Image (cartoon, helix red, strand yellow):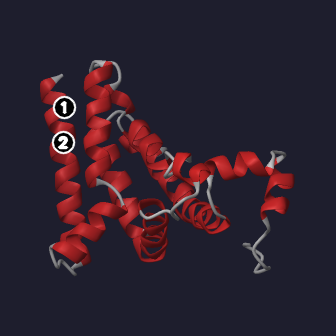
Amino acid sequence: MSTGGAPPSIDEIAAEADVSRRTIYMHFPTLDHLLIDATAGALNEPPVEAALGDPAVADDPVARVEALVRTLLEYSPQSLPLGRRLIRLTVDPAHGNAQEQAAPRRTPRRVKWLEDACKPLRSTLSEERFQRLISALTIVVGWEAQIALRDVRGLDDPQAEQETITWAARVLVEAAIKEG
């Protein structure tokens, strides 16, 4: 797709990934779901990995989470429209398709990024507290938080959006550190 050609078919994707069509459909109920998720990943993964790989934030979980938030919001103009479509596909799946109903709703990319950002806390928090922190951060870091701020709160200032999301994420990490 990056070459500007037509989107690949499920058969082409399965052949390239060396998996069956069934395997693909277990993870992505529709071709649209797969393509949107892959595109969002391609947009966000390189800059997120660079931000989390920055030696300046290596041992500071607060700085790492802030870097993650800043990076995701920087790429938001390109990825949020995809996020809205992906949320629509995963929140309101087609009715009657048992395979689609049983399929995972979203890839765990954000959870992995949050776990990576909070990695310095693994040795200081119990597994239960660490997982609770990741769950709490999942609520405030991502497309859903942006949509709530824009559509529910009416916030249309990107700077205020970034400050709000960064503040919420920082407060959660600092509370986990204090608690741990």
Considering the image in quadrants, where does the C terminus appear?
top left
Per the image, the residue denoted by label 2 is 172
* CA distance separating discs 2 and 1: 6 Å
Residue 80 on image: x %, y %: 42, 72
Determine crowd level at label 2: few under 14, some 14-19, many 20+ residues with C-alpha closer than 10 A: some
Depicted 170 relative to depicted 161: above or below: above
Residue 45 on image: x %, y %: 55, 55
Considering the image in quadrants, where does the N terminus appear?
bottom right
**Residue drawn 18% across and 52% down?**
168
- Give the residue type at disc 1: Ala
- Give the residue type at disc 2: Leu
Residue lying at the far front in this picture: please name it.
Answer: 96
Give the SS element for disc 2: helix
Residue 81 on image: x %, y %: 45, 76
Image marks 2 and 1: residues in contact by CB distance under 8 Å? yes
Determine crowd level at label 1: few under 14, some 14-19, many 20+ residues with C-alpha closer than 10 A: some
Per the image, the residue denoted by label 1 is 176
